[in-house]
Image (cartoon, grey):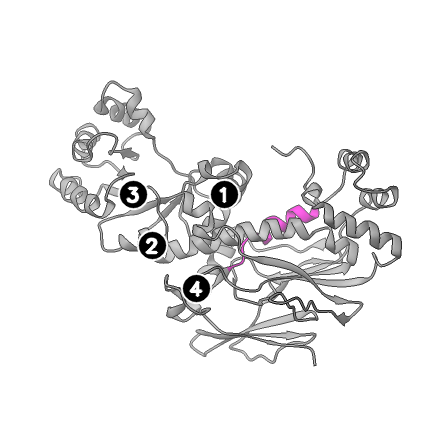
Amino acid sequence: MNTFAPALMTDQYELTMISAALQDGTADRPCVFEVFARRLPGGRRYGVVAGPGRLVELIKNFRFGEAEVRFLREAGIVDETTAKWLEGYRFTGDIDGYAEGELFFPGSPILTVSGTFAECVVLETLILSVLNHDSAVAAGAARMVTAARGRPIIEMGSRRTHEDSAVAAARAAYLAGFASTSNLAAGALYGIPTTGTSAHAFTLLHDDEPAAFASQVAALGKNTTLLVDTYDIGQGIRNAIAVAGPDLRAVRIDSGDLSVLAQHSRELLDSLGATETKIVVSGDMDEYAIATLAAEPVDMYGAGTAVVTGSGAPTAGLVYKLVEVEGRPVVKRSENKATVGGRKTAVRRHKPTGTATEEIIVSQGVPDHSANDRLLQRSFFVGGEAVEQPSLADSREHLRQCLISIPWEGLKLSAGDPAIPVTIVPTV
């Protein structure tokens, strides 16, 4: 585990720029940086903003302590002037952006950081690390929630990623609409409902399957889920009901042709009188696997690897670019990486029915908007002071409403254009 302060999330190239800017006198120039995506991951029709709730707390505590500065000095990474600057670092600027749970599209200014060049650029790696990871997980998880059509999904990917990112991924998946997580740290930190059952190792530990089931039921009661595919699924279900009775909460299937097995399992459970016993399926679940089971008698899904890896898009592709210096728009003209200068303001237009129709982004101005439209940015920091943010539950509901608002084509799993068009109006 990392024992250094969050400030050492900074990349060395950021400190190189700060050192040079302190020396030439440009470090204190007022600047504006923006976070946006040039494009969405292949096949995606929307992105999901996730991570601001974590990011606010990290920036509040973003400090270079004695151990961090000593390391930087001894490694020859910074000179004395820069070391002194780092020792006194506190973010004193403003941060505005899209609310957690908001949808974004190519060019959306999802985060705007204003302050001196040095105090803003030192946050680049931290900001991108949090937003790229959490937004990627949330976008993939939101697609799974759509595919599940109201059936609950359990997040269970902790064993497939870094221990810290596992907690962040569980939070992002819950934001996206997952029902619960198996990660207890996420439950303790964020109040996410937790759930879990035994693994095949528990069944193999015992002399036979009925003994394993009896032990689990004795310890946890009938409101538990028994894993029935260690040996033979049909016999596993018979053993489960024989031990727990027909009011067993659920059985879980973790392998095989889940479409066929779900049908056969439902028929067998019903024949044994366990008509209310639920069927949980897991094992390499992503939005496409979930969608193929839409017509099958599955009651709940467990998803792991695909969740924590963004379901094939492990980063949201977000970048952090300087767009304004001392009130003057600045642009990058590199081929395929050009930027639009100036601080942006965004509005999402809607029909009177509430359906989103387009996103308008204006540089150094505010778009015209009506009662049906919604300005997208909110304050996270004002003058270096954090602004109270919505709860995770509120952000979860905000995302649910956003997904309802986009045209139904935008929820398709197939590749296509962004759910709504985006128009960027540059500085005149």
- Circles 3 and 2, Cβ within 8 Å, touching? The answer is no
Q: Which amino acid type is shown beneath numbered disc 2?
A: Tyr
- Circles 1 and 2, Cβ within 8 Å, touching? The answer is no
Q: Nearer the viewer, mark 2 or mark 4?
A: 2
Q: Nearer the viewer, mark 3 or mark 2?
A: 2
**Of helix, strand and loop, which one carries label 4?**
helix
Viewed as shown, does residue 212 lie left or right of 368? left
Disc 2/disc 4 C-alpha distance (Å): 18 Å
Residue 164 sits in quarter: top right
The image's mark for residue 191 is 1
Residue ID for mark 4: 403
Residue 374 sits in quarter: bottom right
- Circles 2 and 4, Cβ within 8 Å, touching? The answer is no
The image's mark for residue 288 is 2
**Of helix, strand and loop, which one carries label 3?**
strand
Residue 332 sits in quarter: bottom right
Disc 1 residue crowd, few under 14, some 14–19, many 20+, Cα 10 Å = few
**Of helix, strand and loop, which one carries label 2?**
helix
Disc 3 residue crowd, few under 14, some 14–19, many 20+, Cα 10 Å = many
The image's mark for residue 281 is 3
